[in-house]
Image (cartoon, rainbow, N blue to C red):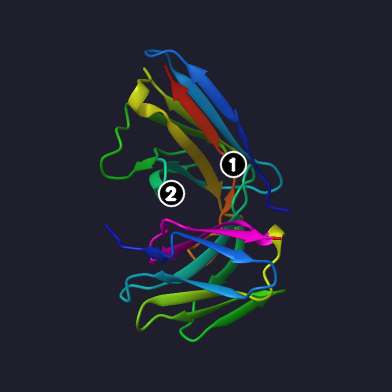
Amino acid sequence: ILNVEQSPQSLHVQEGDSTNFTCSFPSSNFYALHWYRWETAKSPEALFVMTLNGDEKKKGRISATLNTKEGYSYLYIKGSQPEDSATYLCAFGNAGNMLTFGGGTRLMVKP
Amino acid sequence: GAVVSQHPSWVICKSGTSVKIECRSLDFQATTMFWYRQFPKQSLMLMATSNEGSKATYEQGVEKDKFLINHASLTLSTLTVTSAHPEDSSFYICSARASQGPGSPLHFGNGTRLTVT
């Protein structure tokens, strides 16, 4: 069983705050690291797929970094807005076709 | 693009009945679809990989006779929970890739909340 962990489990921030959370995953047999945003009553939406050590990706106010040697990825949100409230999932992919998901970080942004 | 539709969104059934959940890729062909299950406050757990035209691949601990998967076309996979019992109550969600390989993102359905009474 692959161990993919996310921290914190939940996070409350004020509108305008910047925040970040962590995904840790096995450092061996790495192929890809995915981040998804899952809003209530919607389906999970892909944010980033990263495959190279040192990758940094950005989408608007959201960015992610990847360290495959030590097995972690950070997701950053700059100037959080209420619409950023969601559960953020990471998923580790090895060379097989399978993704192993972390437990998610539930972000709540207060106006 | 890359929309996945899942039905029903929620279902309540009596113990002993069977429930079928459909997962459709609306604007792309999916040779492979994935079925996940989520218990409260836990992560998405892969149940099985559905392969078009061939048998599904089940993860360890998932009973294939209990959770029947059929992937008869490139746009439709179904999961049937047979003889459902209260312990099968859970959130089931399907996903598919528009292109192959773990480097391609998954596109998810909205999920199905199953309650067995």
Q: Between residue B37 and residue A95, name the one nearer to us.
A: B37
Mark 1 burial class by Cα count in 10 Å: few <14, some 14-19, many 20+: some
Distance, label 2 to label 1, CA atoms, is 24 Å
Q: Position of residue A92 (x, y in %)?
A: 42, 65
Which residue corresponds to mark 1? B74
Q: Quadrant of the N terminus of chain A?
A: bottom left
User: What secondary structure characterizes most of the magenta part?
Assistant: strand
**Relative image position of residue B32 (x, y in whole percent):** 50, 48
Up/down of B71 relative to B108, above or below: above
Q: Which residues are magenta?
A: A84-110
Q: Nearer the viewer's eye, disc 2 or disc 1?
A: 2
Residue extending furthest toward the bottom: A54
Secondary structure of residue under mark 1: loop
Name the subunit of mark 1.
B
Q: Position of residue B2 (x, y in %)?
A: 68, 52
Residue at position x 48%, y 21% in the image: B19
Q: Can residue B92 be seen in this snapshot?
A: yes
Residue type at mark 1: give it: Leu
Confirm whether residue A76 shows in the render: no
Sooner in the amino-acid sequence: mark 2 or mark 1: 2
Provide the chain ID for the residue under circle 2.
B
**Which label was assigned to residue B88?**
none
Left or right of residue B110: residue A69 = left
Q: Which residue is mark 2?
A: B44
Vertical relation: A52 (above or below) B21: below
Q: In the image shown, does A66 or A97 lie closer to the viewer?
A: A66
Q: Is residue A85 magenta?
A: yes
